[in-house]
Image (cartoon, rainbow, N blue to C red):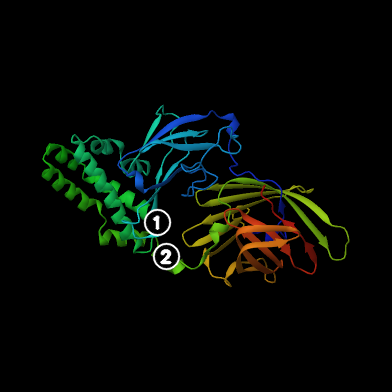
Amino acid sequence: MKKFILMLSFVLSIGFMGCGGGDSDEAKALLQKILQLVGIPQHIVANVCQDKNRNGLCETLELQAKITIKKGDDIDDIWAKITQTEEGRYFLETYDATLPILLELQDASKVNSNDGKFALNFNGFQTNENNETKEISLLEAMIDANALEKKVADKFRTLENQEAQDKYYNVLLESLETNINILSKNGLNSKKTVTASIKEMGDETRDNQIQADRINACKNNQSCVDEELKKLSDELIITEEESNQITQGEGNQAPLENNHNKIDMATYKPTSSMFKNYIEKYKFKDEEEEHTEIIEEEITVENNVISIVTYTNDEDDDIDIETISITEDSIKYEWNENKYKATFQRYINIGDISFKYKITEDLYEECILVEKLSTFSHGGYTYSGDIIKEKCTGYNSSYIYSKKDLGLIVSVNNDDSFDYFNEYYVP
């Protein structure tokens, strides 16, 4: 939103890099790795991807198990892929094996929220490791979340009785899904229910690691195995007191149902790193000449923080820096190293204020969410997709349009003093 204050209007982008930032793929070697599913049934796996922008979602610009890669595809088009080679085994081809891995699951018969969908996060392959295979399991998820030490996990990975081993993994999955249901009732979203569950289960696994020895001591006595697993299961499941403590630690959030019918403004921000080259066209009402200015913008997305550096090609070579931080229920803006700050609600209704900033005693900027659109035309161009329209008044009177996952696509200044025509094009 800083462009309302510092640049008067938004402009036309004529360039786009879907996966920008970092070293070029061409400079890296194509790596081949194996992802091995352990203790997680194949039928609940919805997708597997490398989470390049670390936003917890498998997106179309990211490597996905369900994407079909054609022979001859250029690395500018597809930078990595995952192929399922057999039951529970995935072949990974990538230029950066260190990127985190995301396993999206769906088990509507057991998980009561979010249509049964939830995701597990894993670290990528480390550069100092020679491992060609990475285990994708709940134990590994605990290790990668720093919730469990590897030496403790190995005690349960190497149970002597294979049937006991299989039952143990079933207990882990059932405990996780039960914990997700418990925490979701308190209003935590899917990501936080999984994060909290993995941490609690890691702590309990460490505290009850003696159960691995007791299970081994049962030998082939399955009744004994079941009894010891039941004791462990009781410890892994989050209690009501623990659930309340976790919820309080998350700031006593209101149940997500309150936001169900609202619009999530965070989804209309860029979700991947990219470069944008803008052309700003403007004309003063008392001039016939139309002015053109080139503006470059570098966007970096990391976790829930979006950093935007804007370079203007004028005589002053101005550089503006904007940071957007997305939290559970708010969007925070900072400009030029905390010189300006503003915070707004993340979930709003049509007609609510989406942005408001007081510049001076007499100058302000206020935007209202007007409507959602699937298509609109302007200046000879037609735009389609999931789009929102905002009306801004005050310092700069304009209409702005933003598209899901991409951010701004069009801004038209409606002030009598200016006549701006701005467009954003994604090739």
**Residue 5 placement: quadrant:** bottom right
The crowd level at tag 1 (other Cα within 10 Å; few <14, some 14-19, many 20+) is some
> Of helix, strand and loop, which one carries label 2?
helix
Closer to us: 30 or 285 = 30
> Of helix, strand and loop, which one carries label 1?
helix
**Residue 88 placement: quadrant:** top left
Say if mark 1 contacts mark 2, CB within 8 Å.
Answer: no
Residue 50: x percent and y percent? 47, 41
The mark that comes first in sequence, 1 or 2, is: 1
Residue 227: x percent and y percent? 13, 48
Q: Left or right: where does residue 386 sit relative to residue 46?
A: right
- Kind of residue sitting beneath label 1: Ser
C-alpha distance separating marks 1 and 2: 10 Å
Residue 16: x percent and y percent? 66, 46
Query: Residue 190: which numbered mark, if any?
Result: 1
Q: Is residue 139 above or below residue 406?
A: above
Count of labels shown? 2
- Kind of residue sitting beneath label 2: Leu
Closer to us: 375 or 182 = 375
Residue at 78% of width from left, 49% of height from top? 314
Q: Is residue 197 above or below residue 28?
A: below
The crowd level at tag 2 (other Cα within 10 Å; few <14, some 14-19, many 20+) is some
Quarter containing the N terminus: bottom right
Closer to us: 244 or 274 = 274
Closer to us: 243 or 401 = 401
- Residue tagged 2: 256
Query: Residue 284: which numbered mark, if any?
Result: none
Residue 222: x percent and y percent? 13, 42
